């Protein structure tokens, strides 16, 4: 076991802080999926969250605690964390500068700018963007907020579980998308404290699953970043990971990896049966059950974590043959 350094009361404090500003989680039973999968399937519709993903919970919890003392916040994430941090900073009235490499598509830069953040394009890769973010911290009074390896972010993501546990069901299985592990750690800290026999299944894509590789090796190892439909799950754990690797290692019961066709199928089924527009990373939990890679034992909740995807791309995936 690890010394968690994070308790349920920390997550409850995060919930008190952010609940007035975030959209409340909608949890509902899916008749169609319960029948199709032969179990009690409940869906946590977090892709309906502001900014399109749960990342808002963690980013906002961090920003609200620091808004009075820092000049601004920064990160190198261009995806859902970048959006969430930009929204949170604007909400709190502080600056946000997102550093990114020149290869990041213009559409993503625009999305961040539209939320009031400054986009700083530096160098040709993530490492160079990271150097600029570090400079903002060292010289300009900014604070760097990690997308997952930060206690405040983990506690923020855990607030999703507080809302999940308010539903009238005693879940026995929770299926959660897994990348850096902030979401799974936060949820598991709360849910396992309430229901000690709960089984938590983490789901990543087979292409470049950093946490899975680390769990197998017993230490953090480098993984190749390859293109995947679950782009919001891509990326490494960081050489100096402090929290999420030990937390996930002690809290997760099973980790499942999905092929690209299985991710596409999950997006398709979510759209056809629930009318839910999910990005690949948001759909992997459903995909794990559809592909038969994990079982729904007892009442099962699937976290649908995000819906940020270009509409034309979504249409092509749910209507067409599998392509990446
Ligand atoms: C970031 C993200 C995840 C994974 O969260 P971690 O805390 O990095 O494990 C899952 N789904 C979506 C949509 C995300 O943006």
Image (cartoon, rainbow, N blue to C red):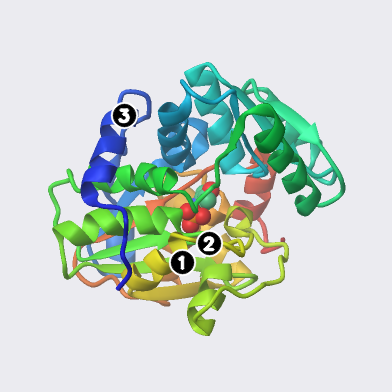
Binning the other alpha carbons within 10 Å of mark 3 as few (below 14), some (14 to 19) or many (20 upward) gives some
Do the numbered discs 1 and 3 sit on residues whose CB atoms are within 8 Å? no
In whole angstroms, how far apart are the C-alphas of marks 1 and 3? 26 Å
Binning the other alpha carbons within 10 Å of mark 2 as few (below 14), some (14 to 19) or many (20 upward) gives some
- Does dot 3 land on a helix, a strand or a loop? helix
**Disc nearest the viewer among 2 and 1:** 2
Residue 264, placed above or below residue 209: above
Q: Is residue 32 visible?
A: no
State the residue at coordinates (55%, 46%): 146
Do the numbered discs 3 and 2 sit on residues whose CB atoms are within 8 Å? no
Left or right, residue 324 beside residue 168 = right
- Tell me which corner region of the image, top left, top right, bottom left or bottom right, holds residue 152: top left
State the residue at coordinates (78%, 32%): 120
112 or 222: which is nearer to us? 222
List x then y, in percent, for residue 264.
58, 61
313 or 240: which is nearer to us? 240
**Disc nearest the viewer among 3 and 2:** 2
Residue 73, placed above or below residue 289: above
Q: Which residue is mark 1?
A: 245
- Tell me which corner region of the image, top left, top right, bottom left or bottom right, holds residue 23: top left
Do the numbered discs 2 and 1 sit on residues whose CB atoms are within 8 Å? yes
Q: Which residue is mark 3?
A: 17
Left or right, residue 314 beside residue 5 = right
Residue 30, placed above or below residue 238: above
């Amino acid at each position: 076991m690890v010394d968690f350094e994070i308790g349920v009361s920390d997550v409850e404090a995060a919930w008190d802080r952010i609940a007035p500003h975030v959209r409340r989680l909608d949890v509902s039973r899916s008749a169609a999926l319960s029948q199709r999968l032969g179990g009690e399937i409940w869906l946590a519709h977090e892709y309906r969250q502001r900014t399109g993903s749960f990342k808002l919970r963690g980013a906002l919890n961090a920003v609200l605690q620091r808004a009075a003392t820092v000049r601004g916040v920064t990160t190198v994430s261009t995806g859902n964390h970048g959006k969430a941090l930009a929204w949170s900073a604007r909400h709190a009235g502080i600056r946000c500068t997102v550093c990114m490499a020149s290869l990041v598509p213009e559409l993503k830069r625009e999305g961040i700018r539209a939320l009031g953040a400054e986009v700083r394009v530096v160098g040709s890769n993530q490492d160079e963007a990271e150097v600029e973010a570090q400079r903002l911290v060292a010289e300009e009074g900014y604070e760097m907020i990690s997308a997952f390896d930060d206690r405040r972010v983990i506690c923020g993501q855990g607030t999703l579980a507080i809302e999940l546990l308010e539903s009238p069901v005693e879940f026995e299985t929770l299926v959660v998308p897994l990348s850096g592990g902030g979401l799974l750690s936060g949820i598991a800290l709360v849910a396992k404290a309430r229901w000690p026999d709960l089984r938590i299944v983490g789901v990543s894509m087979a292409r470049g699953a950093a946490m899975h590789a680390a769990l197998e090796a017993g230490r953090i190892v480098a993984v190749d970043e390859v293109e995947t439909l679950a782009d919001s799950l891509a990326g490494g754990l960081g050489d100096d990971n402090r929290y999420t690797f030990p937390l996930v290692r002690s809290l997760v019961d099973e980790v499942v990896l999905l092929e690209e066709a299985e991710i596409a199928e999950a997006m398709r089924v979510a759209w056809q049966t629930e009318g839910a527009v999910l990005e690949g990373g948001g759909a992997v939990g459903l995909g794990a059950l559809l592909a038969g890679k994990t079982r729904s034992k007892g009442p099962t909740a699937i976290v649908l974590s995000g819906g940020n995807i270009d509409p034309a791309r979504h249409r092509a995936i749910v209507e067409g043959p599998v392509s990446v």
